[in-house]
Image (spheres, rainbow, N blue to C red):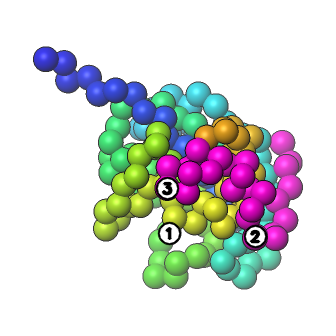
Amino acid sequence: MSNLRKMSKAYLLLGSNIGNREYYFSDAEKLIEQEVGKVIKGSGLYETEPWGIKSKDLFLNKVLLVETNLKPLKILENILEIELKLGRIRSDIKYSSRTIDIDILFVDDLVFNSETLIIPHPQIANRRFALIPLAEVCPEFIHPVLSKTITQLLMECKDKLEVRKVE
């Protein structure tokens, strides 16, 4: 009997709006490779207006497609450690400025709900800053709850905040 777990594809969203955003992305990507799995595809970098907070600091966002053998809660545990290593300070305020934020958007077509993690990410359909880089990486991926492609979700998204490709 093998202990090997099948490889999954995890779609992660990186965000940063304070400090050296490119540095945080570079380091986060290296740490994700070490602690979560092999990055097999990434979107470009997008500069976006803050969503859910008032801040003069624009966000950078990027989606990574990662091949992993970790279960969802272990992925979450590892990305929280990565955020901590890169200076992320969590507060009671739900949306705030941050050095790095890593969200799990999807893991394959898994629907998962626990006290600490919901997959697919419940806000995907409402956020252009997630949908635009996601559409670059996997436009035909079908949201396992909404049964629509990423392209369809983007076309239907009501969010009007600016999302501009910078790299």
* Earlier sequence position, callout 3 versus callout 2: 3
* Earlier sequence position, callout 3 versus callout 1: 1
Q: Which mark is residue 159?
A: 2
| Residue at 29 percent of width and 27 percent of height | 5
Q: Which mark is residue 145?
A: 3
Q: Which residues are magenta?
A: 142-167
| Residue at 35 percent of width and 60 percent of height | 113
Image quarter hosting the C terminus:
top right
The three-letter code of the residue at mark 1 reads Ile
In the rendered image, residue 31, in percent from the top left (x then y), is placed at 50, 39
Alpha carbon distance from label 3 to label 1 = 31 Å
| Residue at 60 percent of width and 75 percent of height | 96
Magenta: predominant secondary structure element? loop
Residue 162 part of the magenta segment: yes
Q: Which residue is mark 1?
A: 89
In the rendered image, residue 74, in percent from the top left (x then y), is placed at 33, 46
On the picture, is 140 further left or further right than 45?
left
- Look at the picture and state if 76 lies above or below 159: above
